[in-house]
Image (tube, rainbow, N blue to C red):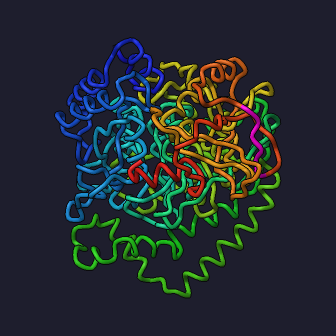
Amino acid sequence: MLPTILDLTSLRAAYEAGKSPLDIIEIVIARRAASTDPAIFITPTPDEILRAEARALTERAPEPNSLPLWGIPFAVKDNIDVKGLPTTAACPAFSYQPQKDATVVARLRAAGAIVIGKTNLDQFATGLNGTRSPYGAPRSVFDKNYVSGGSSSGSAVAVASGLASFALGTDTAGSGRVPAAFNNLVGIKPTPGLVPNVGVVPACRSVDVVTVFAPTVGDGVAIRKVMEGYDAADPFSRKAVPANLPASGLRIGVLEGAEREFFGNRQVEALYDAAIERARALGATIVPFDYTPFRQAAELLYNGPWVAERLAAVKEFLATNSDDFDPTVRAIIEGARAYDAVDAFEGRYRLEALRQKTRSEWEKVDFLMLPTSPTTYTVEEMQADPIVKNSHFGRYTNFANLLDCAAIAIPAGFEASGHLPAGVMLVGPAFTDDAMAPFADAMHRAAETGMGKDRKAALPEASRVILPADDFVPIVVVGAHLTDMPLNHELTRVGGYRLRAARTDDSYRLFALNGTVPPKPGLVRDPDFSGNGVEVEVWALPPAAFAHFVQNIPAPLGVGKITLNDGTCVTGFLCEGHAVAGGREITEFGGWRNYIRAVSPAA
């Protein structure tokens, strides 16, 4: 019997116990049919296609849990392309049939995950409340009178109600975080550019981010790691430069004075104060900071020239189909006509001036802890005043992408009545995505809120996120164990932790080995060779796991010291020289990932 919430640990245990992906899909089909919220999905994946996908997975990878997301059901916000299902962006007249998956969907499917459907959203991802869709308004899983949050409304409700293990959203102003708060979930908002947006209908292209709704921080981070990675087809894609935070003595910025605004919702304010005390109990130093420049930056997203990006995304469709828009969405997008090129430059200058002011605040803290949303509203209240009340939801979320931040939204508890949940966010500088995760996970566990609609659920120990202990052993991986590669789960399942991306020095050559399954490379040091180095990753493993891992490395691979281009020497995968004879040299590709993408573009 599966639990209410389909977290990764529970599903993997079910597979280890003999369940098949088809068994799980049948449960998902039954749960989807029994759902009492008809507005979650715009296009569910048809039952027979779901069954066929499950069968195809077991043919492709028959060993249970042999892929990072083997047999894991997930939902996709309907502004993200899924081949075989229409993309509507919650506007029927806009609908089109994508010819291929969005990059993130392709990566998740390659990792074994199964798409169960396309979920509802505020039309063209314009809104934070979930009521701006001709397909209906998904509701809070705790009270059907209340909004689900948006724009990624259906995605959050699908996970919180136990229909999907995780779901993809997007976040321009907070759409991957606000629905998490309203449905007792974790919302992972990556640093802009960390996760590619190829195949995503843009809202504000320069600041859009694909996000993850998950039951736990550990689940969300694992899923994000599958999706992330540079994609040259996305002009805003970036190669990650992971930022570290102190292992202890974290300084957390919190609101004070006039910047503490909850729009009269004392219960959410009390939950925020309780979260501050939990952070203090976990060893953090609480530092009041001035939110003013962050708030002023946030105001630029809807009250500045960035709204013109929303018009740029749909201008041709709007010119011919203005009557097909939700009236509130149309009013927001048409408001962009009030801005010109001068306003755009002046807005940019204003943002950079505010960024300078935030730097002095960042010097005081390691990351910020803010209310995810200061309040919530019923559907009726939202529809009566859709612009103003929607803006309340974004007071603490709107700045994050403009200021190039990572964020993790976590549950913070339930109102005193026990009725509705609220959440808090950890927000850090660019590429602190991994560094914030252990504390976010600890905060979620300390709050004891359960997962989604199951308030009594215990967070699985296997999903706990930890920083490597001092005795963890670093190891350089070169090929199939890289992030998003087929054997990466052998590192993550034993508590491995990616420290950083790196490159060897210029004396290493890379070869594609013959006859290996899955395909593997061989890294060989040649003192007489002078190249540009090979892309690798440095991971850390618990000592026992490291010993077991090394013991099971198949010949002709082995371990030795690898010299990186920063001069450090780290234990890592090397190959016996005789084994590369007759193999294809692929050093010119710069690394295994680039080679795989070149020979298998869909990988």
Name the side, left or right, on which 142 lies relative to 533.
left
As for residue 561 lying within the magenta part, the answer is yes
Magenta residues span 560-565
Name the side, left or right, on which 360 lies relative to 153.
right
Establish if 319 lies above or below 283.
below
Quadrant (top left, top right, bottom left, bottom right) of the N terminus? top left
Name the side, left or right, on which 530 lies relative to 579.
right
Quarter of the rendering containing residue 6: top left
* Closer to the camera in the image, 194 or 509: 509
* Closer to the camera in the image, 342 or 566: 566
Quarter of the rendering containing residue 112: top left
Establish if 292 lies above or below 513.
below
Q: Main secondary structure of the magenta part?
A: strand
Does residue 465 appear anywhere in the picture?
Answer: yes
Residue 23 locus on image (x, y percent) = 27, 21
Residue 446 locus on image (x, y percent) = 64, 25
- Residue located 20% across and 64% down the image: 93
Residue 403 locus on image (x, y percent) = 64, 62
- Residue located 23% across and 42% down the image: 44
Quarter of the rendering containing residue 537: top right
As for residue 554 lying within the magenta part, the answer is no
